Image (spheres, grey):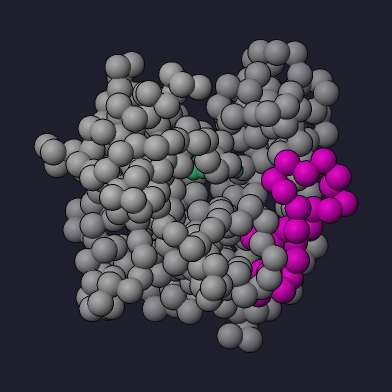
Amino acid sequence: MPGTQQKLRKLMNKFTIYGDFLLGVPFGNGHVNDTYLVTFDQGGVRLNYTMQRINSEVFKEPLKVMENIDRVTQHVLSKIRQAHMEMKKRTMRLLRTPDNLPYVIDDNGSCWRAYVYVERARAYDVLETPEQAYGIAKAFGEFQQQLTDLPGRLHETIPDFHNTPKRIEQLEKAIARDAVGRAAKVQKEIDFILSRKEEAGILMKLNSSGDIPERITHNDTKCNNVLIDDLSGEGVAVIDLDTVMPGLSLYDFGDMVRTCTSPADEDEVDLRKVYMQFDMYEALFKGFCAAANNFMTPAEKENLALSGKIITLEIGTRFLADYLNGDTYFKIKRPEQNLDRCRTQLKLVTSIEEQMNDMQKLLLKK
Ligand code: GN1
Ligand code: MG
């Protein structure tokens, strides 16, 4: 541990930052990057920062990730400045080096970045109330809205990130390879996914036909990627910006349905606890429309409900592929965790299918 502290101290001191490094502790529940909460003593006052090492197995070009994030955070900041002259709103602020770079590189060539920690707000892995769901959907909708006029195109840092048919192809390859001999055990899950292959491609098809445009999207709109203010309960800041890149708005909405509507954890073992709660969906629908109604096309609106099913199937597909590949992508804390994660996703797909008619009806009521 002292080694880690020294390393974190050395890296943090490469940023332009006043005061003395006190401590860094592992932080959050991300499946990909390493995250630390770092505390500095600044003239007797303690200030916190979130520091992260970008996983370069997943993000092959971390500098492009950082360029995207830098452009996006500066753009969002300028929008907030326009709207709130006194800068009341908290947002993501990257630390910079004396050379004005928003990252530092360690001795192993890994890329690290740090943000000013957003105080008096927290992320929830499982939501408690529809008000929280509303706030999260509104925050992600506003985020997309704020980025509609970002000049130029962002780097596609992970190609085909939300290309559901490609994700299913990757699963098929993992089944054929069966690297660690697990395929026979998960035939039920494989059949479930493959029987929905056709429907899984609908959003990509609507994109090819021009009905659904490419936008700048977040691409990882889990409920714990919006910080909720401790006092007001409102969404204060959209975080985890690594995957912000060109994408489809509906995948962002869908991932909220996947992560905000079930009362259980993503790796819950008791599947009876996993289901879609309609009041949570309704709150998401209203929150997202409050911010995104102005820019969504008719095809986007019509497919809001379906998007929840498609991305839940997609992430279930990815968890299963990783399980078959021997757990090489998502971090795990126990051997069957990726299979458990896959099963919750498939259970949620079933629950969404059962309620699809009612979900669609919300469009007419609006
Ligand atoms: C990963 O690390 P985290 O939790 O922010 C993954 C997402 C998945 C999610 C599933 C870059 O996100 O795509 O939806 O796990 N991120 C990447 O919980 O693959
Ligand atoms: Mg993430």
* Residue found farthest to the front: 44
Residue plotted at (35% across, 43% down): 40
In the rendered image, the vertical position of residue 246 relative to residue 78, given as above or below: above
58 relative position to 98: left or right: right
Please tell me in which quadrant of the rendered image residue 64 appears: top left
Please tell me in which quadrant of the rendered image residue 366 appears: bottom right
Q: Nearer the viewer, residue 78 or 147?
A: 78
Residue 118 among magenta residues: no
Residue plotted at (70% across, 65% down): 128
Residue 280 among magenta residues: yes
Which x, y percent locates residue 34? 47, 32
In the rendered image, the vertical position of residue 9 relative to residue 229, given as above or below: above
In the rendered image, the vertical position of residue 282 relative to residue 322, given as above or below: below
272 relative position to 305: left or right: right
Part of the protein shown in magenta:
259-284
Which x, y percent locates residue 90? 36, 65
Which x, y percent locates residue 356? 72, 66
Res. 99 in view: yes
Res. 284 in view: no
Q: Nearer the viewer, residue 20 or 10?
A: 20
Figure label count: 0
Residue plotted at (23% across, 45% down): 18
Which x, y percent locates residue 49? 38, 46
Residue plotted at (30% across, 34% down): 12
